[in-house]
Structure formats: structure tokens, C-alpha cells
Image (cartoon, rainbow, N blue to C red):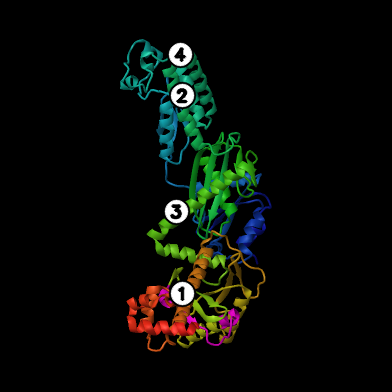
Amino acid sequence: MRTPLELQIQTLPDNPGVYQYFDKDDKLLYVGKAKNLKKRVMSYFNKVHDNGKTNVLVKKIASIKHIVVLTESEALLLENNLIKKLQPRYNILLKDDKTYPWICIKREPFPRIFSTRRIVKDGSEYFGPYTSFKTVHTLLDLIKELYPLRTCNYDLSEANIRSGKFKVCLEFHLGNCKGPCEGHEPMNVYMDHVHAIREILKGNFKESLKDFKKHMQELAADMRFEEAQNIKEKIEVLENYQARSTVFNPRISNLDAFTIISDESMAYVNFIQVSHGAIIRSHTMEIKKKLDESDEELLELAVVELRERFQLKSKEVLVPFPLNLGENVNVTVPKLGDKKLILDLSERNARFYRMDQLKQEKIVDPDRHTNRIMAQMKKDLRLPEEPRHIECFDNSNIQGANPVAACVVFKDGKPSKKDYRHFNIKTVEGPNDFASMEEVVFRRYKRLLDENEPLPQLIIIDGGKGQLSSALKSLDILGLRGKITILGIAKRLEEIFYPGDSVPLYLDKKSETLKIIQQLRNEAHRFGITFHRDKRSKSALQTSVETIPGIGEKTMVTLLQHFKSVKRMTAAPEEEIAKVVGPSKAKKITEFYQAKNK
């Protein structure tokens, strides 16, 4: 017999809508939207989810409620409103505690223009919100330099001005205000300035530049060169600001770009607002994942929230992949051109923001940083467990001479240098990387097993399929195949190979997982090369030293430290060698090399 929950699922409609999950105490757990309610809800119950939180959520669901709407975009808006209103435990809450600054054009005679964090519904105009006060101050400084407006809060009604109720202040004498309080500036001229400021706040500089240039030419024609020079300086200020803010084609007007960068636990959504080719606003928000939400789901919710929060009215939205944002919004996924550049810039902002947050996390909470990287590596490399202990192997030889190998160890994503090991190749003749790799892997894990030491969760082989197959033979002999994950990394394209899989894995070049693997590979290479060079130098030293009668190793080391190489030492005159080790030894060394070269 079916349970009440199963009956609810079976009777769900195939229409777009919003579903709500409740627990046995009738407490709301989760709100979601779907194009097809029945299919979406059934997907939660007909499989075991990779994400543990999703499995916990499914076990807690006792009842389901739903609301049917006409379109998927309506479902998206309803979902956003319900999440903010009801705040379910398992939902992403796209909110923060900031009150963003606005620029206000006050509804009053001779309007003041100032920054505020409060919106008063008195008919005043508000531009924003801006994501930082720095942007607001820059704009207000620009406006102040271009247009002298009043800063006092007098009621400059026509009757008050005519009666002479107010007197000009210091701002008038400094040239920062034209004195409308005493009637020195007509209302129509003042309002022309306000109109020009309104256009600048919208990102349109064209009209102000045109008016200033026209006025400058009129002043110059009237021989008022000093005043014309003042207007020219204002034009330069405006053009300089425009040059710093206009980074795209000026014909691109009134659109918003949204991008997302995510990892195992967090997502970062950036938006850029463009008007008349100028970036007039940019903001990045953090989203903490609660379930295994996809980038599409997160970005869809974030776009709706950000457009509502920042009162974005643009009809065109740029996104990295298709989204359903309703019939009134034109969603564009650009592939080339200026719009693609805007989207790339937005993604770069999100990426840099994420990097800054991770750097701070690494300093403030290193354990959380480590846990996040381990979880990300487990996911990226499809591992059965987090790779807390990783070992990487590399061979080093020159045409088979002085063959050595190195094993480096990382624990919790960091080098554990006390566990590094060198290997002299004992059973292989000539330059045979495959056989050498087989030998060192066998010796390493035979010893760990004999000494009952902990084994790594991940082994990385520096090389392609051949080296990986050789290492795998040793694990087979030791009975460790399947107990330890092993993979190979090929240098040319940073391909990652798995045993028995002919198709390599390609990780994002900027991913932290690939960076750690590259760090392991480079460290193994460095450690192996250093050992190989030391061995080669010692071999060369022994060849030169031990064949000269009466000359010991210490003497030869002293000479090599002075001359830097055997070649320089053999070419040096006897007198110069004598200065280092004395005439008797210098004579023996010189006679030996002279006899050898005959």
C-alpha cells in the first residue's frame, strides 16, 4: 500500500510551479521551482544523491505542497519571493545585511543632490544603489566640479527668495554655488544643470560634453577667453572620467551582465551594469551552497534577486548559459564581440573576488581552507575518499647514467618534507623509465606494508600511460590495486590518466586541484633532479680524485670549490693550483693530467 507521501508525488501535475517540502512537524524544509512539477519532485526520490545534504533532506520530507503557475518564469519569481519570506532551512538565501548608498535628487525648488542610505518616498529621484561609497563620492566630486549647486537646506520657494529671507553663504563667495537663495541664478538655468547631472548619473556623458563645447566656443567668440578656459577644464574633467569608465562600444547601452564561479561549497555571482558603453555599477555576491545546486539554478535565483535589489530595469541580460528570466527580458549568451568582452570582464571580477576570499580564508581559518580543497579534489578526481595523504613519483637519469627516483609526500595539501624519499635504481640497466618506476613503487609500498605504516589515498605518477601501467604492476603484486587510487599526469597537455581508461581527464587550468597536482609533480621533479645532480657530481669527483696518487678527497673538494669545475682545474697553471693546495700537491696534480693528456 502506498504511503501518503507517495500518493502526493503520484498525483502532482505536469505543469510549471513551485513545490514545498515539509517535515513530520509540518516545518518548511525547502522551496523549489520546476517546469514540470511531477518530474522534478520524483527526481528527489528515485535515486541516491551524491550530495549527503540532499539525502538528509529527502529522509526528512513528510509532506509536499505545490502551487501551479502559468510559466516557468512566474515560478522563478514566486520561488524567490517564498524563499525570502519563509526562509526554509535547506534553501539558499540570496541576501546580505548591507544598506547600499544612493544618490538622491531631492524633490524641491532648486533640488539638492546628495548621497543617502535611506529612501524616502516623497517624489525625489534616487540613483543606485551603488556597491561602494567610493563610487558615490567620485560621482559627487565630478558633479560638484562641473555644476555649482546649492548644499544648504533652505526652502527656496519663490516667495521666500522674493522677500529676501536668505543671504548668500561662504559657498557663493568660493564659487561653489551661484546664489539661488538671493535670486542670482534663475530656476530654468539651475534645472538645466540638474537635467545634465541626471544624464551623467545614467551614464550618458554625450549631452553634457556637447553643451560645454558649444558654450566654450560662444565664450571664445566673444573674446571671453578666461571663462572659455574654465569651461575647457570642465570638459577635460568630464572626458577624463568618461575615459576611465567607458571601456566598451558607446553604442552598447542599458544591459546587465551576470556570471558565476563556484566550487564545492560556495558560489560567487558578479553583475556589471553597462550604460552608454560605461560600467556604472559592479557587484559580487557570495552564495553558500546547501544542497548540490547547479550553477544554472544558482545564477537564475541570483539574477532575479540582484535585479530586484538594485532595481535593474535593463531589457537585455548577458549570461554564460541560457536562462529563463521571463518574457520581458532578452537573455543573450554572447560568443564574440563587445558583449562577450563584457561577460568575460564580469567573470574575471567574480574569479578575483573568489581568490581574495580564499586568501582571507586561508589566513583566518586554515582548517576550513584545507577541508574545502580536499573536498574539491575528491570531486574533481572522482576519488572514493578525500586525498589527505598523496605521494608522487618521478624518475631522473641522463642516457641511463646515475638513474635515481624521487617520492614526495603531501599531507592535507601541503608538502611533508620529512617523508620525502630518494631511490637509487638497483635492478634496471640502461635508460628504462618504465622498469625504474615499477621498481621504486614496489620498494616504497613493500616497505610501508612491512613496517605497518599508513598508505596514501592517492598516488600520482609523473608520466603518461606507460609509467602508469608500470606502477600499476607493482600495486598488483602487492595486492594494493583498488585500495589506493593511482593516476598519471602527462606534461604536454596536463592530461590525467586513470588505469584502464583510454580517455584522459582535463581539469580547468585554473583549478586548485590541478595546481596541487602540478605542485606535487614539480616538487618530485626538483627533488629527483637535485639528487641526480649530487650523485653525478660525486661520481665525477670520484673519477677525478681517486685516480691521482697522493691526492685525497678533501684536497680535491677544496680545488673544485676554488676552480668551480674539473675542466678549469686541469687547464690551470701549476702556480695557481699551488696557491690553493701547496707546491707539492700542485706538482702531483699537474704531472698526472699532463701524462693523461699525452
Give the residues drawn in magenta, as a range.
416-438
Query: Is the residue marked by circle 3 packed among few (<14), some (14-19), or many (20+) residues within 10 Å?
Result: few
The residue type indicated by label 4 comes to: Met
- Identify the residue shown where x is 56% and y is 46%: 258
In the foreground, 394 or 245? 394
Q: Which badge, 2 or 1, comes first in the chain's sequence?
A: 2
- Identify the residue shown where x is 62% and y is 45%: 73
The residue type indicated by label 3 comes to: Asp
Q: Secondary structure at mark 2?
A: helix
Residue tagged by mark 3? Answer: 356
Q: Secondary structure at mark 4?
A: loop
In the foreground, 451 or 535? 535
Q: Residue furthest top?
A: 163
In the foreground, 288 or 112? 112
* C-alpha distance separating marks 3 and 4: 56 Å
Q: Which badge, 4 or 1, comes first in the chain's sequence?
A: 4
Q: Where is 497 relative to 428, above or below?
A: above
Judged by depth in the image, the label closer to the viewer, 3 or 4, is 4
The residue type indicated by label 1 comes to: Thr
Residue tagged by mark 4? Answer: 223
Residue tagged by mark 1? Answer: 530
Residue tagged by mark 2? Answer: 232
On-image quarter of the N terminus: bottom right
Judged by depth in the image, the label closer to the viewer, 3 or 2, is 2
Judged by depth in the image, the label closer to the viewer, 1 or 3, is 1
Q: Which badge, 3 or 4, comes first in the chain's sequence?
A: 4
